[in-house]
Image (cartoon, grey):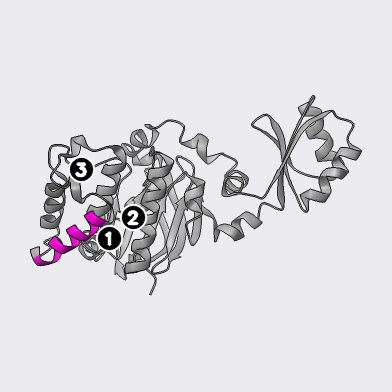
Amino acid sequence: MDAIAVEHLYKRFGTFEAVKDVSFSVKQGEVFGFLGPNGAGKTTTINILCTLLSSSSGSATVDGFDLRSSKNDVRKSIGLVFQDSTLDEYLTAEQNLLFHAYAYAIPKAVYRPRMDELLEMLSLSARRKDRIRTFSGGMKRRLEIVRGLLHHPKVLFLDEPTLGLDPQTRNTIWQYLQSLRDKEGITIFLTTHYMDEAEYCNRIGIIDHGSIVALDTPEHLKDTVGGDVVSVQAANMEALSKEISSRYQLTTSLQNGAVTFSVQDGEHFLPRLMRDTGQEITSIALRRPTLDDVFLKITGRDIRNQHADPYAAMKQRRGFASR
C-alpha cells in the first residue's frame, strides 16, 4: 500500500485552476520532494493532502484513508510542520508538546517516553522548561519537528523545513530526519527550495502551473538536462551565444554573466570550441548537471529567485488562490 496516492486531483478557486489533474503516489518509507515555483500549486496540494483544504474533484488517500470520507483518520496519521512557526511563544517547550498530546488524546504512558526520546534526539532536553520566545530559529524548527512526530504519525509533511536557517543547522536537522526515517520507517513529504536538500529525496515531483511536469529520482532528472553544463564568458557575450547556437545547434542562455548550455562529453567539446570560435573567451567552467539545472530547464525559472523575498510564502499563504 502506498503512503500517499493521488488520482486526477483538481482544485479551483472560481475560474482559476490552482491544481490541474495531478496524479502521483508516494511509497511507504520514502522521502518525497515536491518542488515548484511560487504559484505552481504545491502549497494548495499539500493543504489538500493535510485536510486543510478540500479538492474540487479527484481522489486521494493518505495512509490508506480517503481524504473525503476519513478526514479524522488522515489527521491522526500525519504530522505537519508548517513553514511559519505555530508554537506558542509564551509557553515552554514542554507545555507546547503537552498541549499537542492533549489535542491528539495521547495517553500519558505513551507521550511521556516519546517526548523524552524526541527531545533528546533533537538536542532539546536541556531547554524543555524554557519559554519558546527564548529559542533561536533553529531550535524552534527542531521543536516543531518533535511536535509533529509526537503522536507517531505514518506520514510527516514538511513545508520548507529549513527555510532561513544556517547551513550547519540545516544539515543537523536532516541528520535527525534521516535517522527517524531509518528507525521508524516514516514517510516524509517535503517542499524545499534548497536543491542540496532535494538530493536527500528518493524521488522528486516538480509541479508548474498546477500540473506535474516531472517525476523521477534526482539522478534520472539530472540526466534529462542533456550532458555536462558549460558556462563561458567572453568579450562579446551575445555574439558568442549566437555562434554556439548556430554552429553546434545547441540551446544557450545567459545566466549569471555567462553563456550557459548543455553538451554531451563536455571535456572533449571545449577544445573544439576554443579552436573554432572567433570570439575572445575570458573564462570557461564545466560541471555535471544539478537539480537547479533541471528546475530551470523544466520551468524556465530559477527556484532560488522564486524565494528571494523571505516573506513571500507568508503573503501567499494568506490567499490560497495564488498557489
Residue beneath disc 2: 157
Q: Is residue 197 left or right of residue 163?
A: right
Count residues near mark 3 (Cα–Cα under 10 Å), then give few for <14, some for 14-19, many for 20+. Answer: some
Dot 2: what SS? strand
Q: Quadrant of residue 182?
A: bottom left
Mark toward the start of the polypeptide (3 vs 1): 1
Mark toward the start of the polypeptide (1 vs 2): 1
- 294 in relation to 9, above or below: above
- The CA span between labels 3 and 1 is 18 Å
Residue type at mark 2: give it.
Answer: Phe
Dot 1: what SS? strand
Q: Is residue 146 left or right of residue 216?
A: left
Q: Quadrant of residue 51?
A: bottom left
Residue 158's label in the rendered image is: none
Residue for point 39% across, 53% down? 174
In magenta stretch: residue 110 = yes
For the magenta stretch, what is the residue range? 109-120
Residue beneath disc 1: 78
Dot 3: what SS? loop
Residue beneath disc 3: 87
Place of residue 280 in the rendered image (x, y in percent of width and height, measured from the top left): 84, 28
Place of residue 109 in the rendered image (x, y in percent of width and height, measured from the top left): 10, 66
Q: Nearer the viewer, residue 102 or 10?
A: 102
Residue for point 14% across, 66% down? 110
**Label 3 close to label 1 by CB (< 8 Å):** no
List the single residue furthest toward the top.
Answer: 235
Q: What secondary structure is the magenta-colored segment mainly? A: helix
Count residues near mark 1 (Cα–Cα under 10 Å), then give few for <14, some for 14-19, many for 20+. Answer: many
Q: Is residue 272 visible?
A: yes
Residue type at mark 3: give it.
Answer: Leu
In magenta stretch: residue 6 = no
Q: Is residue 58 visible?
A: no
